[in-house]
Amino acid sequence: MSARFAIEPLTKGHQRKTFLCGNERIDHYFRETVTQDIKRRYATCFVAHDLETDRIAGFYTLSSNNVPLTAVPKPMASRLPRYPTVPAVLIGWLGRDQSYSGLGLGEALLFDAIKTVAEAPIGAHAIFADAIDGKAAAFYTAFGFTPLTDRPNTLYLPVATAQRLLSGEAL
């Protein structure tokens, strides 16, 4: 991603009404609901702000989360403590405006979310992503996320793997 975009927390000054990613649920959430989630501290929202046009090109949300240990794929679960749940951070929503297709912005938003979580001074074993459909699940899988055993559109990436990914180490 070039210096054309700045990824920053969503503020009241950002114009959300023209955002159109092509998925009605994502568009509606971003235009109508995200600020309520922020006010209630259910989520934080980061936007890719186009510095040339002052438009929002994309966004993602992060929330604290946990998942039952039994839902984590067995090879990964076998290495975890026997607590009932795994502490995590959830990428709940991620969308890119259609007019910015082909620029790698979705990937840049995902990597920014991963970096934000991996560098946060909180305990979280994993990053989870709720994919809205199979195409979105394939997007996350391409970056090393693994589907949960009982929820194929909820995907899992250990923070340790994310840190290696960010440092350029081979996975």
Image (spheres, rainbow, N blue to C red):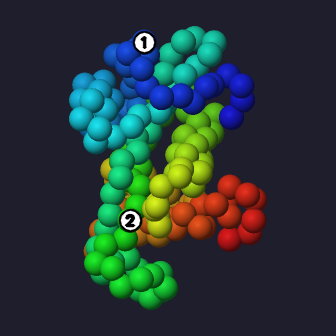
Report which quarter residue 170 is drawn in: bottom right
Question: Foreground residue, 41 or 70?
Answer: 41
Q: Earlier in the sequence, mark 1 or mark 2?
A: 1
Q: Amino acid under label 2? A: Pro
What residue did someone put label 1 on? Answer: 13
Q: Which mark is residue 87?
A: 2
Q: Nearer the viewer, residue 109 or 44?
A: 44
Q: In the structure shown, which secondary structural element does the residue marked by tag 1 occupy?
A: loop
Residue at the farthest front position:
121
Above or below 141: residue 34: above
Seen at 38% across and 15% down, the residue is: 12
Q: Which three-letter amino acid code belongs to the residue tagged 1? A: Gly
Give neighbour class at mark 2: few <14, some 14-19, many 20+ (Cα, 10 Å): some
Marks 1 and 2 in Cβ contact (< 8 Å): no
The answer to whether residue 25 is above or below residue 137 is: above
Q: Position of residue 171 (x, y in %)?
A: 68, 71
